[in-house]
Image (tube, helix red, strand yellow):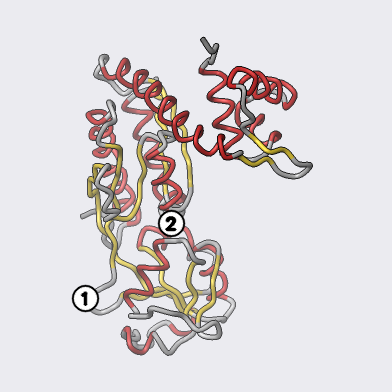
């Protein structure tokens, strides 16, 4: 009988995910030689090579590719057993891994963390900021417990809970304050700055402008909302940002903010988690905390609509 351990499997999963011994060792909080030794032991137990090693890269072998999803399933089941034990206490305790998209994280996370620590001082929060598709993948693989994203995600295996809606606002140079707000048809002809490919907020802005494809000289891409707003302040173009970002992103830029005429562009933010998660009851409680945090943010800004 093979002597496989959970430690072997966790180290294998880390190396398969990172494709690099150094980064995988850091993720596992062990030395690189120790990780290498554990992987070698695992391969000896299996009698097969799991990785192709080169000076710069580590790749899964054909057998490794078949082995990886089964390992992830085992580790996810083990994590769910731990979650099941925690749910028996009927309180928010232990580790909670939350994923958040970049157009929400900087603005809402402080209020969420403050409220969660008030609700449960024993909560061990792990925050992961990434794009929607990456978060959904990590959720499916059991690497996070829940994600705060724009809805809908339309994944049959996930529970979706809508939390609040917010509108998008137009950000222009300060000299344009008071000028008529362009409609979506006019906006298509202007120099519009958007987030780079992969951000759901980019797709939502393009949808509002009815732009399916973007000509390079008309649209400029940025890596963050901060970059976009600063570019507008420098006189390069104009952009759309979600309402919750206004207070943070416009305080140090020479820009003006205007609301669009109805129907205004908007998005719905919600929480998603696996339908099979033993933490479903606790996550529903946490969703209410997030809803309250959004209302708190709205009240502190004193203007605009953030909560549904």
Number of marks: 2
Residue depicted at 37% across the width and 34% down the height: 145
Judged from the image, the secondary structure of the residue bearing numbered disc 2 is: loop
Residue depicted at 41% across the width and 72% down the height: 240
Q: Position of residue 82 (x, y in %)?
A: 37, 18
Asked if residue 101 lies left or right of residue 21, the reply is left
* Residue 79 quadrant: top left
The numbered dot on residue 189 is none
| 173 or 84: nearer the viewer | 84
Q: Where is residue 6 in the image (x, y as percent from the top left)?
A: 51, 18
Q: Where is residue 2 in the image (x, y as percent from the top left)?
A: 54, 13
Q: Is residue 142 above or below residue 123?
A: below
Residue depicted at 43% across the width and 56% down the height: 103
Asked if residue 300 lies left or right of residue 30, the reply is left
Asked if residue 65 lies left or right of residue 161, the reply is right
Q: Position of residue 129 (x, y in %)?
A: 48, 46
| 134 or 172: nearer the viewer | 134
* Residue 16 quadrant: top right
Distance of mark 2 from mark 1, alpha carbons? 22 Å
Q: Is residue 293 above or below residue 223?
A: above
Q: Mark 1 points at which residue?
A: 263
* Residue 287 quadrant: top left
**How many residues crowd around disc 2 within 10 Å: few (fewer than 14), some, or many (20 or more)?**
many
Q: Mark 2 points at which residue?
A: 103
| 138 or 293: nearer the viewer | 138
Judged from the image, the secondary structure of the residue bearing numbered disc 1 is: loop
Q: Do the residues labelled 2 and 1 touch (CB within 8 Å)?
A: no
Asked if residue 204 lies left or right of residue 25, the reply is left
Tell me which numbered mark, 2 or 1, is placed earlier along the sequence. 2
Q: Is residue 224 above or below residue 60?
A: below
| 2 or 133: nearer the viewer | 2
């Amino acid at each position: 009988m093979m002597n496989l351990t959970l430690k072997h499997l966790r180290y294998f999963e880390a190396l398969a995910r990172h494709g690099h011994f150094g980064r995988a060792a850091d993720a596992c909080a062990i030395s690189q030689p120790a990780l290498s030794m554990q992987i070698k032991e695992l391969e000896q137990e299996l009698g097969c090579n799991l990785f192709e090693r080169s000076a710069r890269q580590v790749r899964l072998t054909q057998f490794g590719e078949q082995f990886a999803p089964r390992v992830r399933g085992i580790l996810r089941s083990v994590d769910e057993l731990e979650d099941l034990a925690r749910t028996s206490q009927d309180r928010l305790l232990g580790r909670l891994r939350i994923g958040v998209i970049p157009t929400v994280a900087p603005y809402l996370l402080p209020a969420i963390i403050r409220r969660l620590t008030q609700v449960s001082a024993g909560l061990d929060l792990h925050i992961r900021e990434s794009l929607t598709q990456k978060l959904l993948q990590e959720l499916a693989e059991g690497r996070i417990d829940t994600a705060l994203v724009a809805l809908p995600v339309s994944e049959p295996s996930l529970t979706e809970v809508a939390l609040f809606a917010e509108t998008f606002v137009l950000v222009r140079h300060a000299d344009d304050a008071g000028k008529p707000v362009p409609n979506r048809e006019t906006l298509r002809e202007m120099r519009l700055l958007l987030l780079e490919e992969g951000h759901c907020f980019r797709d939502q802005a393009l949808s509002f402008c009815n732009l399916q494809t973007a000509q390079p000289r008309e649209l400029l891409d940025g890596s963050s909302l901060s970059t976009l707003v600063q570019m507008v302040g420098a006189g390069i173009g104009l952009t759309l940002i979600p309402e919750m970002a206004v207070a943070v992103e416009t305080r140090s830029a020479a820009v003006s903010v205007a609301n669009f005429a109805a129907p205004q562009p908007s998005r719905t933010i919600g929480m998603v988690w696996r339908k099979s998660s033993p933490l479903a009851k606790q996550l529903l409680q946490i969703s209410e905390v997030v809803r309250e945090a959004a209302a708190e943010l709205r009240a502190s800004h004193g203007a605009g609509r953030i909560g549904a």
